[in-house]
Amino acid sequence: MPLRTDNMPSSQPLKSLQEILRQRQQSEFVGRDDYLSTFSSNLKLPLDDSRRCFLFNAWGQGGVGKSTLLKQFSKSAEEVRATVAYTDESETSVPEALGRLAEQFIQQGYKLNQFAERYRLYRQRKQELETDPKAPQGFSAFVGKTVVKAGVKLGRRVPLGGAMLDFVDEDTLSAQAGEWASYVAKKLCNKDEVQLVQEPVTVLTPLFLQDLFTLAQEVCVALFFDTYEQTSEFLDTWLRDVLEGKHGDVPSNIVITIAGRHPLDDNHWATYDGLIARFPLEPFTEEEAKQYLHRKDITNPKVVEVILHLSGRLPLLVATLAVGSPDDPDQVSEPSDTSVERFLKWVEDPKHRQIALAAALPRKFNRDILAQLVGEDDAEALFNWLKKNALCETAAR
């Protein structure tokens, strides 16, 4: 006989741990009410309603709560029985992103038959080629990208023989791409498999969309693309190609949400203005920050004051400082180490990391101070990089 506890009535179905976590996260969520209301109301509009948006774009500096907002949007979508799929910086190519989205559909009981079978073959052949000791140098950077006549279209930060593609000239890259293509053609006898490995985006995307169209006949589909400042290099052009119909029809029963540090580029996305709802995210208001702390049982006015001061009301830092529900101002620790390291997560260039750390120390930082550190020649480029990446709030002052 299974064991029962007194606080687990037999008439009540057992909740999953994930469900309990979602409920607690929901109870701690504050602010963004207008955005949540807009997203939820939009899901209930008829597909042909002129007010309905099919694209949502949320942006703001690191730690402002973009990922948390996407989780709330996801919950709203699930409440209207939409099927939800999410991707972020964990994926480094379009095929990987498609694979992760498809995997989540399968977990919800919707199998993308055409895509799943071809993607399984793609991964199998990709692994076989990558582990071949005779594979050309840099081949693993080639697999998953798109070969074009002029060479190969790769992300700017993909390693190539220990270097970065930013510094590889186009002729060298084209020659290397030719070597990779010849290797694939020699190893794979089936021409369809050769195309699958050399041009996976061209092959896999139409299959994904065909299966998605079938799925959308049953339920609304909500796709979420998080950390877009990292993934836009390979996703942005692809997403716009998808919306333009270059890979086939896109179902209308779909909502796409994109979140990153920067808004979608108007130069590329202006065509879709009538379909996009834009959500710029700012730090908590003082009232919102106090509300969050109150829910964490932090009510000592002096503790609240210290947390608001140290965090700048940035949601991530407010949450970090609230851990343990401190009841004494001396228990509140400086959050700089945690926040700066989080913001530098994807910064690989040692010079950029050093400058970002230096800029995080003073309360105010400008180009003139930077010029004293690095010299006049490098100051402009590095200061623009700091502002673009919003690695320190004071750098823009």
Image: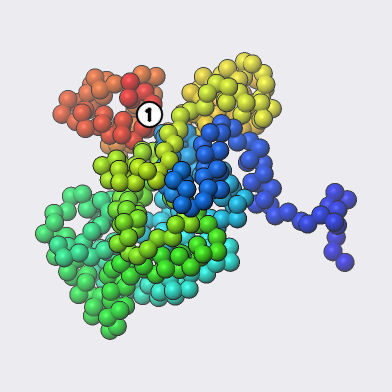
Q: Position of residue 364 (x, y in %)?
A: 36, 19
Q: Residue at x 32, y 60 (%)?
A: 245
Residue 45 in view of the camera = yes
Q: Write down the residue under mark 1.
A: 392
Q: Which residue lies furthest to the bottom in this view?
A: 189
Identify whether 282 is placed above or below 123. Answer: above
Q: Which amino acid does label 1 sit on?
A: Cys
Q: In this view, does 381 lie to the left or right of 393?
A: left
Identify whether 230 is placed above or below 351. Answer: below
Q: 266 or 328, which is in the foreground?
A: 266
Q: Where is residue 306 in the image (x, y as percent from the top left)?
A: 56, 19
Q: In this view, does 20 lie to the left or right of 73?
A: right
Identify whether 118 is placed above or below 256. Answer: below
Q: 125 or 196, which is in the foreground?
A: 196
Q: What element does badge 1 sit on?
A: loop
Hey, which quadrant is residue 180 in on the image?
bottom left
Q: Which residue lies furthest to the top in this view?
A: 302
Q: Residue at x 13, y 54 (%)?
A: 169
Q: Position of residue 373 (x, y in %)?
A: 25, 24
Hey, which quadrant is residue 369 in on the image?
top left
Hey, which quadrant is residue 179 in on the image?
bottom left
The C terminus: image quadrant? top left
Residue 140 in view of the camera = no
Identify whether 327 is placed above or below 209. Answer: above
